[in-house]
Image (cartoon, grey):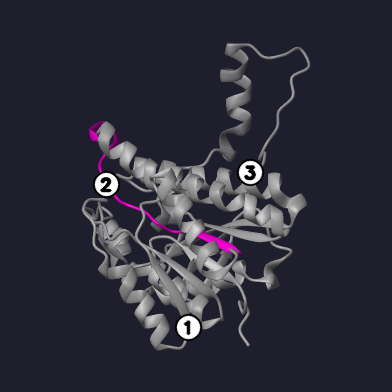
């Protein structure tokens, strides 16, 4: 008996890397899968039917049940088709894992409008399109789980990934809104930030010794380490968990704190531009954070 027996789960970007590991684990836990992947390149160009079907074949060979879906989540009709395939093939849908992504890195002052839109369209808009298509079904059945794959590039920061970081941080706000809006219907939503070597992390700029060291650490972290947490969040065992942000790093699981006030200063007569500079800033200076990238925070070797 698996934690996901009887569940139907749609996973986007499931033809390779982390998505493939998520699909295999969810299937091993008893879920029926819609394996979505349009088979594009890392930058989102081209199509290839092979990856999604290959994962379906792997799942079936292991005794599981899965179908392939080749839609692009950045197309609202394509995203809706993922849900339709689940309903038509298996009669229901119980969880959606928004994992699909593309990468078009570059320093902000060189970021093209095209590369900005391409990343936002897949990560953020695609997650909205699919989640919006699934929400009415979740509401009608009185249950459902959303999982959004975020990133420490957004939660903490990374150089040369303004489009990716912005999209991944936006998913945290989207997930939290879903958790609040839909809690009355028994629907949950959470985020997972994975550390794992994949096509996506291969694109991380590594020009400094520190960045190169971070990449070497990433290579020791495999996608299968992320899968159990995502499978758990899709299961009824996680019924009390919603609106959270988790991070998985090899054998470590972290719970991130939400954005909350750190320090408050009151001035009864109100503030002027000058007093903000001369009174407020000195009072909160010790609470200001330094700019960091993910590797500065997770500076120890993966355990």
Distance CA(mark 3)–CA(mark 2): 27 Å
Dot 3: element: helix
Q: Are marks 1 and 3 in contact (CB under 8 Å)?
A: no
Q: Are marks 3 and 2 in contact (CB under 8 Å)?
A: no
Q: Is residue 68 visible?
A: yes
Residue 53 in the image, given as x and y percentages of width and height: 32, 72
Which numbered disc, 1 or 2, marks the residue that appears first in the sequence?
Answer: 1
Up/down of 101 relative to 93, above or below: above
Mark linked to residue 299? none
Dot 2: element: loop
Q: Mark 3 — residue?
A: 177
The quadrant of the picture occupied by the N terminus is bottom right
Q: Nearer the viewer, mark 3 or mark 2?
A: 3
Residue 85 in the image, given as x and y percentages of width and height: 47, 62
Mark linked to residue 104? 2
Up/down of 264 relative to 196, above or below: above
Query: Looking at the image, which residue is at 59% across and 39% down?
Result: 287
Q: Is residue 298 left or right of residue 243?
A: left
Which numbered disc, 3 or 2, marks the residue that appears first in the sequence?
Answer: 2
Which numbered disc, 1 or 3, marks the residue that appears first in the sequence?
Answer: 1
Q: Nearer the viewer, mark 1 or mark 2?
A: 1
Distance CA(mark 1)–CA(mark 2): 35 Å
Q: Mark 1 — residue?
A: 64
Q: Residues in magenta?
A: 94-110
């Amino acid at each position: 008996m698996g934690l996901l027996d009887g569940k139907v789960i749609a996973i986007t970007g499931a033809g390779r890397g982390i998505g493939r590991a998520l699909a295999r684990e969810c299937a091993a836990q008893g879920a029926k899968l819609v394996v979505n992947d349009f088979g594009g390149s890392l930058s989102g160009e081209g199509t290839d039917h092979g990856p999604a079907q290959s994962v379906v074949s792997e799942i079936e060979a292991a005794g599981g049940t899965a179908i392939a879906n080749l839609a692009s989540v950045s197309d609202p009709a394509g995203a809706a088709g993922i849900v339709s395939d689940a309903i038509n093939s298996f009669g229901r849908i119980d969880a959606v894992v928004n994992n699909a992504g593309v990468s078009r890195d570059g320093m902000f002052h060189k970021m093209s409008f095209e590369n900005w839109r391409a990343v936002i369209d897949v990560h953020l808009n695609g997650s909205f399109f699919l989640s919006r298509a699934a929400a009415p079904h979740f509401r009608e059945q009185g249950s459902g789980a959303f999982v959004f794959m975020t990133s420490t590039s957004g939660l903490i920061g990374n150089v040369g990934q303004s489009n990716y970081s912005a999209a991944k941080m936006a998913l945290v706000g989207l997930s939290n809104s879903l958790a609040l809006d839909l809690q009355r219907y028994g629907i949950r939503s959470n985020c997972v930030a994975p550390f794992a070597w994949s096509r996506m992390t291969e694109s991380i700029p590594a020009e400094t010794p520190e960045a190169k060291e971070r990449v070497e650490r990433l290579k020791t972290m495999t996608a299968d380490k992320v899968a159990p947490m995502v499978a758990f969040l899709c299961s009824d065992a996680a019924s009390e968990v919603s609106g959270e942000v988790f991070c998985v790093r090899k054998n470590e699981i972290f719970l991130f704190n939400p954005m909350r006030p750190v320090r408050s200063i009151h001035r009864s007569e109100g503030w002027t531009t000058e007093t903000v500079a001369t009174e407020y800033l000195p009072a909160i200076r010790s609470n200001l954070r330094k700019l960091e990238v993910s590797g500065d925070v997770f500076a120890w070797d993966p355990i």
